[in-house]
Amino acid sequence: MENQFKAPREKKVLVVDDNMANSFALAAMTERLGFQVKQAGSGREAINDVCQEEYDIILMDHLMPEMNGIEAIKQILFVSKGKKRPVIIGVSATVDQAVKDEFLQAGADDVLEKPVRMQKLEELVQSLGVNSEETDSEEIDEDEEIVEIAVDEILDSVSGLNYPKGIEFMAGSVENYMKVLMVSVKNISENYHAIELAYENKRMDNVALYFHSLKGIFLNIGAESLAELSRQLEMAAKAEEFENVMDRIPDFVKQVQEFDEKLSDACDDYQQKIYAVHATEQISTDDFAGKLAELRAHIEDFEYIEITDLLEQMLPCVSGKQEEYLKKINEAIQNFEYDMAMELLDDLQQEL
């Protein structure tokens, strides 16, 4: 779908989700629509962000640890009194009448169901009256076309991944879809390890949340059968059918682990192909210093998408210590260790 609606760059969106894969998917969509996007990993972090600056739209996840999206919306509206009221859109993998009523009663303007489709998001934003102005649609560059040819070969190896559907969720952007996959690898691992630990300790109190998180990730990337398995176990855990859940966990974890390993290998293969595309490019000392300054600004603002885009441009053009440092920075960013990334950047700049 070609986007007819584009928001001006100064319009700001806050994406709130404890799951970074889900958060990144929504952030990539809203950025593609032309918004400036910031991500918050919890309800409390979102409240703090709203106290610091005004947002035009807030996309709020439903189920999160410590503070769920419903309570976060109430607090955000409280601290927003006397300021411009943001448009608030609830986001949930389950949108029945009860969930919708919860969001609306808390003060949300509407609710979207995961996995969010870009067209639905675009239409809803328009219907809620966020001021916008049209801009020229972004063209897919030659690099993305090259990668799009190779991505079929790369992702065919990941059994159970309906990647055409995942790319469709990202409005046809192969680049953004691959970035979602790279974030998903770590999130999937974190959740299935948490489920393993709960199984070993026979503690089922929080296990439904891990199944819920995995369900959201799998839905976003097009891993439909694993999403359905996660949903079934989430429902069983919520119903306190713990014996059933315990019986099914070993096979479930094995399937998820095998999927995650194949996905990790595919993402590594993709990254190597990206580097190969840019391998012959050169970068001057002045340009490199300028890009490092730009990288610093993005890290300071926790702008994951901009950081990864910039590192993707820079890495193929350097070698030696510069390449070594940038790879370590990239690894830190993939683990969302922004302080570590900044320390590495400081060390790199001292080496220049």
Image: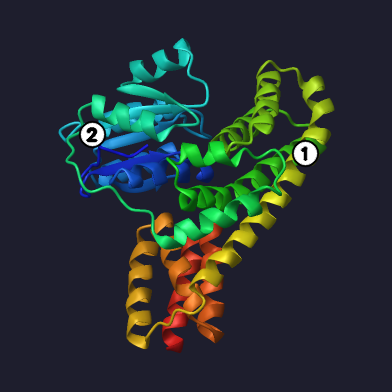
Q: Residue sitting at 60 percent across and 46 percent down? A: 187
What kind of residue is marked 2? Answer: Ser
Q: 326 left or right of 29?
A: right
Please name the residue that numbered disc 2 is placed on.
80
Q: Residue sitting at 70 percent across and 46 percent down? A: 158
Quadrant for the N terminus in the image: top left
Q: Of helix, strand and loop, which one carries label 1?
A: helix
What kind of residue is marked 1? Answer: Gln
Q: 172 left or right of 184?
A: left
Q: Residue sitting at 32 percent across and 45 percent down? A: 49
The quarter of the picture where residue 292 lies is bottom left
Q: Of helix, strand and loop, which one carries label 2?
A: loop
Q: Is residue 336 visible?
A: no
Q: Work out whether 350 lies above or below 126.
A: below
Q: Position of residue 299 (x, y in %)?
A: 40, 63
Q: Position of residue 3 (x, y in %)?
A: 31, 39
Residue 115: assigned label? none
Residue 255: assigned label? 1
Q: Position of residue 64 (x, y in %)?
A: 51, 33
